[in-house]
Amino acid sequence: ECPGRQTCRYQRYLEESKKQDVFLQICNHNYLLADAFHRREEYKPLLADYRALVVDEAHKLPEAARQMFGKNLCMDDIREIAYYLEREHQNVEARTLKAGMYSIFTIIMESHISSHGIKENFQLTGECEFCLWEGIQMIERMMEQLKGVVPKWVLNRFQEAKEVLECFLQKNSKYVLHLRMDKEKIPVLCAASRE
């Protein structure tokens, strides 16, 4: 408990905003999403129940929601992991990761090409199933090899990538699975939460 809690203007505002006679609630997009997360997990809500809500920077809400409640994997994520591997002098692993994942993204793209571009709705074709499985196996092997060699947070990034691949391989029903193209025309694996 903070000793200045009773005199803090912000804390006084929070107490005031919880009163029943407050008609209008103002918050930013991140605070609204944090409140939604608290309510979903059955924690104490951050915002009082409101009749009207004004969301500051509401145009950032969709992207913030995707980041908070969804999972994505793109070639830029893989390059970032590879960069951290190179900083740890794991150059062979970095090259293997980039080449392997580029191949996976290419196979997924080729399986979803149409005359109008890429099909956004993900379909688990036989080729996609095999390459996703191979990608998961590659990441698991690398994580095992690199345990104790690279920092834990780098392994966590591997784990996040693996979870996205598993989500697509298992057609996880908690997520809407779709593809979009990045600026280099490489598919981004997007899993948006249904909750």
Image: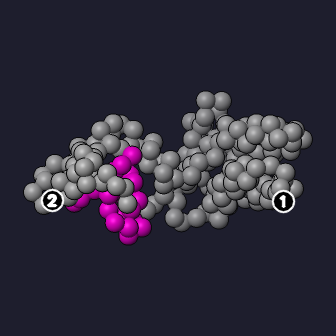
- The relative height of residue 129 versus residue 75 in the rendered view (above or below) is below
Furthest residue in direction top, as rendered: 183
Q: Quadrant of residue 80?
A: top right
**Which residue appears at 87% of the width and 39% of the height?**
89
User: Is the residue marked by circle 2 packed among few (<14), some (14-19), or many (20+) residues within 10 Å?
Assistant: few
Q: Is-magenta flag for residue 170?
A: no
Mark 2 belongs to which amino acid? Lys
**Which residue appears at 73% of the width and 59% of the height?**
129
Mark 1 belongs to which amino acid? Glu
Q: Which mark is residue 19?
A: 2
Residue stretch in magenta? 30-49
Circle 2 or circle 1, nearest the eye:
2
Report, in whole angstroms, how far the alpha carbon at label 2 lies from the one at label 1. 53 Å
User: 51 or 10, which is in the foreground?
Assistant: 10
- The relative height of residue 134 versus residue 84 in the rendered view (above or below) is below
User: 76 or 194, which is in the foreground?
Assistant: 76
Quick check: 56 left or right of 172?
left
Residue where numbered disc 1 is placed:
144
Give x and y (percent) for residue 104: 75, 47
**Which residue appears at 73% of the width and 53% of the height?**
152
From the image, which quarter does the C terminus lie in?
bottom left
From the image, which quarter does the N terminus lie in?
bottom left
Give x and y (percent) for residue 118: 60, 40
